[in-house]
Amino acid sequence: MTDKYPNLLSKGTIGTLETRNKTVMCAMGINQSDKGFVNDAVINHYAERAKGGIGLIMIEVTCVDAPVGLNTSNMLVADDDKYIPGLTKLTDAIHVHGAKCMLQLSHTGRGSRRKITGHQPVAPSAVAMPYSFMMGLGNEEPRALTIKEIQEIEDKYAQAALRAKKAGFDGVEIHSVGYYMGQQFLSSTANVRTDEYGGNPENRVRFHLNIIGKIKKLCGEDFPIVVKLSAVEQGEDAGITMQDGMYYAKRFQDAGADAIEVLAGTWKKEAGLEDMPDSASIPSSRKGQGDAVRGMPYWEMKTMIIPSGKQVIVVGGGVAGVEAARIASIRGHRVSLYERSGQIGGQIFQAMAPPHKENMKPLIAYLEKQLSIHNVEAHLNTELTAEEIISRKPDAVVCATGVRPSVLPIPGFDRAVHAKDILDGGECKEKAVIIGGGSVGCETAEYLAEQGKKVTVIEMLDTMAEKMTNVARTILMGHLKGLGVELLTSCKCKEITEDTVVCELDGRERRIPADTVIAAVGDRPNDSLYQELQGKVEELYNVGDSACPDSIAAAVSQGYYCGRNI
């Protein structure tokens, strides 16, 4: 790997800090602290990433001024010396595995919630945070800070940086993106002050320049500082132009910042059909060029131990099965994979069928390529029985046989077609009712509505697509609203007739006309093969959705660790 990526895996530098390679795990909040204190959950999360070989870890958003500056009730906090012992345990756990770490310092400003903090939010100006589909937020009007209060918050950033240094962090990052106070000072729409902290870019950058200067004074010139910057705001409430962003980055550098992490943001009340989840981030050195790459949350770079080869059969060509086969082959085993359909990829084909999911398509080619380059024998259109597997006397068997649809105990449910059959190209008439408003149900609704179908989605819970990430969910909800999809929450399906779905809504019966009823009520593990093989092969594994239906990421993770364990 070193020969293939000599620059990536060579040592990196940020100011006086030297890292073992140029990969960076950017800050991602996990909201797992114990009322601001580091606990075992936080330590274990970051220690595992350090074990994986990342060069530098940016520890998640950490409050410098609790409670008013909190984002969530379990946000990390560094506004008092009492937090230093826990932070020290965290840095020790990271450093022992060879990675370096910085602490991201933040104040939520007008984005904080009274129900969490017990206080009215504070901000550069008394301008309420607009609703944004990107963040799913919007908030009450904040109280404008006085100059004295601004200076006190600057001091809190610097004091938090000093605590980070005492705890063993290798530097700090000033958080100035999204709905946080740092970005609010830099934005002409959030910061409408006319004093020394507002009115023009020269004044709006003062807050950051003062913080950088105060950190340098307390922590020394050799303690690296990174600024995470929204280089441009777009949309209805945009307040940072690209020219502003370039000016701010130059001023940060001149003030002593050692690197800039660059993102972009948008303020729009609703997602348009052109909006798709995306992100871009790259830490840049003071030399003005990007010299590090954003790392995956867990990147395994250690050389695997190669055992004596075993004969391994993998049943199922979805992501879990392919990953298990890939890793087992890398470890020196002889691996054969059997897929009953004519293609590798499993449920990815249904997952990428809804609109705006084209970014998943390259995953199919990736899976096929992995089987090829790692010499896994792939047998398509082949379904093995338990008896056939046993007769081949394999040393290990991996069952990755996916799911089967769940069934609801309601009259007429057998009239429903399954959402995944629709996503596979199944017929749908003009009036569709989808039972189940999870991610599959809502994405199927968008898929059909774009074809001109009249679609209603009914969901027992009070929220649609509850388990989707906030950005993806709010974009999808915006699309459904624009397409005229009727979304009924707290609605229970009671019966399916030939042309009607009978449901209960607000204590009353409602009959919804339907010529196609679609079930999107989740899946059950298809683990029958695994159960049949219990006790009949030397090593038996069940991975992916056939063990527990979950996300693609979970399936890949299970496949990976299964391959490692064979």
Image (spheres, rainbow, N blue to C red):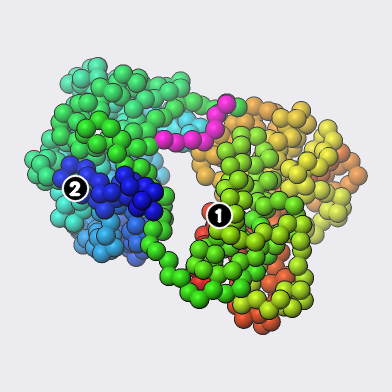
User: Based on the displayed image, in which of its 4 quarters is residue 457 positioned?
Assistant: top right
- Whether the magenta-drawn stretch holds residue 279 is answered as yes
Looking at the rendered structure, the kind of residue marked 1 is: Ile
Mark 1: few, some, or many residues within 10 Å (few <14, many ≥20)?
A: few
Mark 2: few, some, or many residues within 10 Å (few <14, many ≥20)?
A: some
Residue at image coords 55%, 29%: 275
Looking at the rendered structure, the kind of residue marked 2 is: Leu
User: Based on the displayed image, in which of its 4 quarters is residue 266 positioned?
Assistant: top left
The percent coordinates of residue 37 (x first, y second) are: 29, 58
Residue at image coords 27%, 60%: 98
The percent coordinates of residue 398 (x first, y second) are: 63, 69
Q: Looking at the image, how many numbered discs can be counted on the residues?
A: 2
Span highlighted in magenta in the image: 274-280
Looking at the picture, tell me which residue is in the foreground, 116 or 248.
248
Q: Is residue 61 above or below residue 337?
A: above
Residue 73 in sight in this render: no
Look at mark 2 in the image and give the residue it sits on: 17
Horizontal side of residue 263 vs 286, given as left or right: right
* Mark 2 touches mark 1? (CB < 8 Å): no
The percent coordinates of residue 176 (x first, y second) are: 30, 35
Residue at image coords 21%, 34%: 286
Horizontal side of residue 565 vs 172, given as left or right: right
Residue at image coords 68%, 40%: 353
Q: Is residue 169 above or below residue 243?
A: below
- Whether the magenta-drawn stretch holds residue 145 is answered as no
Q: Which mark is residue 373?
A: 1
Looking at the picture, tell me which residue is in the foreground, 351 or 519.
351
Q: Is residue 345 above or below residue 173?
A: below
SS category of the residue bearing label 2: strand
